[in-house]
Amino acid sequence: MNFDFSDEQKQMRDAARKFLAEKCPPKAVREVLDGKAAYDKQLWKGLAEMGFLGVAIPEQFGGAGAGHLELCVIAEEMGRANAPVPFSSTVYLAAEALLLAGSDAQKQKWLPKIASGEAIGTLALFEGKGNPSPKAIKLQASGGTLSGVKKPVPDGAIADFAVVAARTGSTGRDSDISLFLVDLKAGGVEAKSLTNIDPTRGQAELTFKNAKAEPLGAAGDGWSILTQVLDRAAVLLAFEQVGGSDRALEMGRDYALDRIAFGRPIGSFQAVKHILADMYVSATLARSNCYYGAWALSTNASELPEAAAAARISATQAFQHCSKNNIQVHGGMGFTWEFDCHMYYRRANATALTLGSLSYWEDQLIDRMRKKNAA
């Protein structure tokens, strides 16, 4: 049995890596990091032209119709490049929610715009500190309108539309939650950018004031749909994290080979070798879990909930470990603004909280395995 990507998928990976190396060098990332732009619009346009935004969107909705394995390949390269674009919020969250629960009319309206780069989407789930939970959702839906506050919302300040989780019942059950589609440019929504450890992936506070909304999926199915969306996004974001881990490892290795101390490369010292070896082990372990997640996602296997949690946990740990130790290998220079180490350290810590904390996913993995064993 072959657990690797196919030759065609590897060719897509090579094409994406070449494109991002040319169009998304560290200098382009710093343009957004320095606050000169909310995101890299030229890169976003280029990703659409290459077909990467719609790689998992069916052809009938303007996408390439390739599939989730191909999207995993692209996600890894996005992570390697530290791409400063709203890719995860639009493709992993908004598009996946539409594919899972959207009506044909909703899909026809938004999916072609996502694939062409015309629209940026997001998922408005959180309402302050804490992990995903039906009880944490207070924003109210009534009479086709929404009222309340969502924060942090990934790329909420630049998004054109949002999938919003809202409360439609008071029974205390998961069925109290429903999903809605909101055109953020139609009025009734105020967006405020929030301070974030990684400005290349913006966060915002969205205030809904009787904003018009249309149901996404059946009433009361919101939390069930959200769980599936988060599992899918967990696998895809894990590939981004693995890509970032590998790049941080490469940066540390290259510096260790070039930096001379006491007449020899620092990479020849045993202490540095141990650091790099530990980074390699964590990144490789994460990749193994990500491949399991990719298989489960692409085949819609019953093991997806466990596989998604395992991929999310191992990739989060690997990215944080590799980005931190990349700074250690660089020594005092690694902490400076001029070196690129901090950009991956920022991204590692920001993505660690994007879909819920590490402890949340650890609890999810344990609960899911217990339920599966009990069955």
Image (cartoon, grey):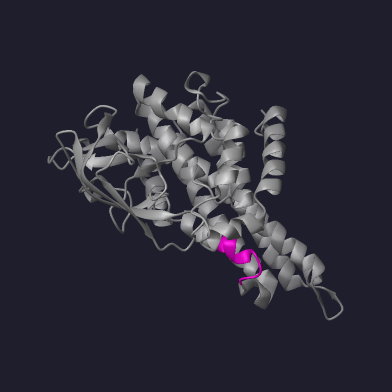
Residue at 51% across, 43% down: 87
Of residue 308 and residue 328, the one placed in the foreground of this image is 328
Magenta segment range? Answer: 337-345
Going by the picture, which residue comes out furthest to the left? 170
Front one among 369 and 137:
137
Residue 301 drawn above or below residue 186: above
What residue is shown at x 61% (from left), y 60% (from top)?
322
Nearer to me, 370 or 232 = 232
Q: Quadrant of the N terminus?
A: top right
Residue at (32% x, 46% y) in the render = 125
Give the total number of marks visible in the rendering: 0
Q: Position of residue 163 (x, y in %)?
A: 34, 38
Residue 64 is situated, as x and y percent measured from the top left of the image, at 57, 25
Q: Residue at x 18, y 33 (%)?
A: 144
Position of residue 8 in the picture relative to residue 110 (left or right): right
Q: Is residue 317 magenta?
A: no
Image x and y of residue 361, in percent: 41, 50
- Relative to 44, 126 lies left or right: left
Residue extending farthest right: 263
Residue 327: name its quadrant.
Answer: bottom right
Q: Quadrant of the C terminus?
A: top left
